[in-house]
Image (spheres, rainbow, N blue to C red):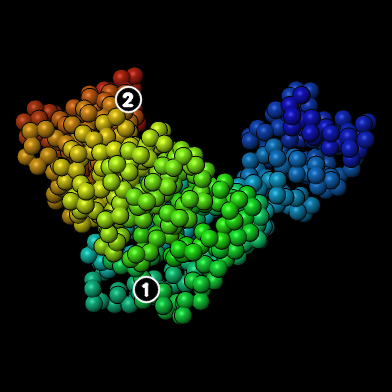
Amino acid sequence: MPVQCACLETCCVKWFGPGRGAFWVAAIYSTVSGSSYAQGPEAAVDRRVAVLLLPGRLDMALCGGVGAASLPSELVVHIFSFLPAPDRLRASAACSHWRECLFYPALWPELRLSLRVALSERPRLEFLMRKCGCFVRELRVEFAAENYVSGPASSPADPSSASSWCDASTDGNVLTPGPHEEAGSDGDSQHASRWLDVLRTYLELVLCVLSSIRSNRNLQKLSLFGDISILQQNGTITNTYLNKVDPGGKKIRQIQQFFEEILGNSRQLKWLSCGFMLEIVTPTSLSSLSNPVANTIEHLSLLDNHSPANTTLISAIELERFVHLRSLALDFCDFTAEMARVLANNNHVPLHRLSLLVHNTSLKSKTLDRMPEDEDWKALTRNSTNLRVYMMAFDVKSDDMLRILKPSIPLERIHFDSYITCVSGAVVDLISRQYDTFLTHFILMNDVNDMSGFPDLSDNRNEDPLVLLAWRCLRLSLLAVHGYTVWAHNLIAIARLRGPDLKMLEVTEESIDFDQSELADQDVDPVHNLIEQVCAVLSPVSTYHADFICTSI
């Protein structure tokens, strides 16, 4: 008998006695699965018949026995445990007693919320947090501004979400400027008004979340992700807007206080991730963690590229407490040589993953003089032999990248996203030569408004840097290129070099260029013909396999 069945039978015997208990088990499974208990209780989890799990139907199945509304809460919760969340909601809609059982802690170990920064979200958020905030063990909340908040600007804003990457698990949404808004027009005042509303709502939603979980001692995972576009406009932090919606910084201080209370009250926290959350984390926040909790945390992600110059969210001394850290995500400017030496110490467990965010905003206010040198990376990898580094670079100059990319970094994934400064072929060439044994993911994005021409990485070279990347990096499994010129014959060469091992090849259709001789000899659509050729190499079994994705802007 399956474990769940044994538990259910135990509950029924406990509440109704040995004789009636067996009858209740059969009746419940008959109702849930649409079949008799003897035919197999595993059918109870069949989503197709979840609609049968209604108190009215259960009353009929019991043939005049005690009604479903009188079932003990313990038994109702156990019935709910068989069902996915949507079916639980459907089942609870018909009976007030069952609705009361819907929010038992055992049914809500994890809560994942993706919130639009809009007033309409607040009532639902308050309800959920009031019901689950005090006991939920894993909480993940992502705040995302709606696209209409884009305003007059000369260039797109930064990527608005990097939550999956913050969790060190890559892409984000991009807010583009309104196409018809011009500086000095009435659109400026309307845009400012919208930003004020968004910031005001954002602060209220954050306060709602944090105030609901500040006394939760069972919290094991906490992940909070903001939207960079909420914090920025035209590349600068929105201090002007923030001062208007939060005079004197009262709400910000309250948010920081709630966050420190959460850390101070935690007893089981093992995962802490906080990215782009409008100064929610301060240099003193982590001191609220007790030593026993800090010693057991395994994942720590603190990303805030707008922290003031000479200020870091975690110091090397503070990092010494996190001896069981296996995954770490920080701004690159905050990851110093001293931190690398702390993590290389034998009293720390080996680090498995290090995610570093390189942002032009941070580089403008902070120095690279304290970054780890090649010897520091060698020492770190000696202690952490399985360490892999993820790196995201937003609008970083090639000279800075050439300085940052040390030979001994075990770089496995790198993501470039630019809207002003393009990546040079020299950077791509350096990556392919230094990290040929590690690199698996290479993402190159250029967010341009002018579609008339894309930068060409080959730069009159005999060999295209992307082809060399595919030739040298034997473990490459994902290659995505958007906003850079890619020649069709080079795409075919990349596919042939890596073959089926290249699980994903994604390019922008508008950036593909063809030789005139190739176009003259073809009677069919050249893009369609290219897709056929590439897919035939990447996935010989199926010509139209999802390995090659040709997108359109």
Residue beneath the point at 22% across and 23% down: 496
Residue 164 position (above or below residue 18): below
Q: Residues within 10 Å of mark 1 (few under 14, many from 20)?
A: few
Residue beneath the point at 7% across and 33% down: 462
- Residue 459 quadrant: top left
- Residue 189 quadrant: bottom left
Q: Nearer the viewer, mark 1 or mark 2?
A: 1
- Residue annotated with mark 2: 501
* 494, 295: nearer the viewer: 295
Left or right? Give the position of 537 relative to 258. left
* 41, 394: nearer the viewer: 394
- Residue 60 percent coordinates (x, y): 83, 39
Q: Is residue 324 visible?
A: yes
Amino acid tagged 1: Asn
* Disc ID at residue 252: none
Disc 2, SS: helix
Residue beneath the point at 52% across and 64% down: 206
Name of the residue lying farthest toward the top: 541
- Residue 156 percent coordinates (x, y): 27, 59
* Disc ID at residue 239: 1
- Residue 505 quadrant: top left
Residue beneath the point at 79% across and 33% down: 7
- Residue 434 percent coordinates (x, y): 23, 35
Q: Are marks 1 and 2 in contact (CB under 8 Å)?
A: no
Disc 1, SS: helix
Q: Sequence-wise, which precedes: disc 1 or disc 2?
A: 1
* 322, 526: nearer the viewer: 322
The N terminus is located in which quarter?
top right
Residue 367 position (above or below residue 338): below
Q: CA distance from mark 1 to mark 2?
A: 48 Å
Amino acid tagged 2: Asp
